[in-house]
Image (cartoon, rainbow, N blue to C red):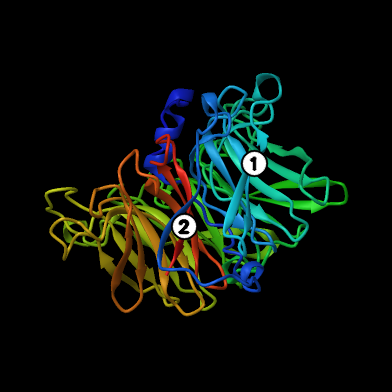
Amino acid sequence: MRCFGTEPTRGKAALAAWKTFAASLCAATLAALSSLAQPAQAAGISTLYSFCELNGCQDGAAPGGGLVADAQGNLFGTTQSGGNINSAGVIYEVVRHPKRGTARYRSLYEFCALPACADGRYPLGRLVIDGAGRLYGTTWSGGDVNSGVAFMLSPRSAGHSKWSYAVLQSFCSGQPTCVAGAVPLSGFTYAGAYAGAPYDGTSPLYGVASRGGKYGNGTVYSLRHHQLDWKFRALYAFCPDLGTCAGGSAPQLAVLDGADNLYGIANGGNQNAGLVFKLTPGSGNAYSESVLHDFCSSPNCADGKFPSDLIVDAGGNLFGTARQGGVTSHLYCGGCGTLFKIASDDTFSVLHAFCARTPRCTDGFAPSGITLTPSGDIYGVTFYGGKTNAGTLFRMAATMHTLFSFCPNGCSAGANPVAAPLQDGAGKLFGVAAGGGESSHGTVYEFTR
């Protein structure tokens, strides 16, 4: 993703979110879903909800951050627009009844409810959920100085009929004394997220802000629960040399491994095609940065360019996607994107170049979110390509397998999927598509293998 030059207008928010896949990288909550007893179903996709069913999209439109689940298998996510108030996005729940095969949608919170949108607007990135059902996330706009917020939404009743919203941090921009950063473009990560462990509600949450900070080029930060409050701490400010920015700028997401190292993707690099960075904790809680891979390092950008997602496994291996690069001359996309691996010894390899072996890009192109299963398989989505150029759902094992091709607007399954799919203990996948559905404003889907 390219760093914003100016604050986008509200009308561009959904489109910007679709194209940049800010996605996010929070826990897959495999353990929370593994105990569900679900009836066998035929392979295929079903739509759990089509957005904008209510007049004026009061129920939300353009879902973007992916899904998380509670212990009962209910799904939670955000939309980039819609809602009763200023079309600033909503937090929603899809209540599932697996035995009956039904699902019910409800809006939990509509952003911009406070004057001047002090509660934030335009949520972006996957939510984090803890054992008590509290939800944590970020918006890239709104807040005290319109630079985004970090928030928590807490259930106040056993049936989730009432919720309480709180701003944990209001980000800042253009203020000489502000080191927090501005415009967070992804959600949070935390210790154990890589293994699918649920968030404990008290340990630090880690995130990135794409702008601001000490040098004006973005920050990595933490939020730690302390007594009745949350304490913010800036961990690293990008581009300390104020020159070449060899370590990148405008970070887009971060993931945490078992040794408390933080990894992420950022703009910049030698070819201005993006990079993967690593932050290593040192004495006095100071972090040092190293660049693990600079994209477009291979001839003709065969390694990819503009990274879009990153995950880490228990062995410290990184897996990610790049939106472009790979195949360099194609009818549809020129450079169609890559799926890559950075091993624990920092060795980089391309696992799959999209459109390389399928003349009509039936495997998709412009990949975004990916999920790693305990068996080592990777599931993910592409925004474009497939049979009707509306994106794909894929599985990468020893080879690439296209599981489903999404369809253009007007199709009930949805179009242009975004964010990593969520897998439950029965092998079902749940995700969101930014377009398509009954009103062409996106869907929540379920895929059964």
Q: Which residue is mark 1?
A: 106
Q: Is residue 287 left or right of residue 356?
A: right
Expressed as whole percent of the image width and height from the top left, the position of residue 394 reads 35, 64
- The percent position of residue 446, horizontal first and vertical second, equals 48, 58
Identity of the residue drawn at 17% across and 60% down: 299
Going from N to C along the chain, the mark reached first, 1 or 2, is: 1
Specify the quadrant that holds the C terminus. bottom left
Of residue 419 and residue 147, the one placed in the foreground of this image is 419
- Residue under pointer 2: 420
Examine the rendered structure and indicate whether residue 441 appears above or below residue 383: above
Q: Nearer the viewer, mark 1 or mark 2?
A: 1
- Work out which residue is located at the far top of the displayed protein and give it: 115
Residue at image coords 44%, 61%: 447
Q: Amino acid at mark 2?
A: Ala
In the image, residue 329 sits, relative to residue 3, either above or below, namely: below
409 or 175: which is nearer to us?
409
At a point 23% along the width and 54% down the height, the residue shown is 387
Give x and y (percent) for residue 230: 78, 46
Please state which amino acid type lies under the numbered disc 1: Arg
Q: Position of residue 438 (x, y in %)?
A: 42, 38
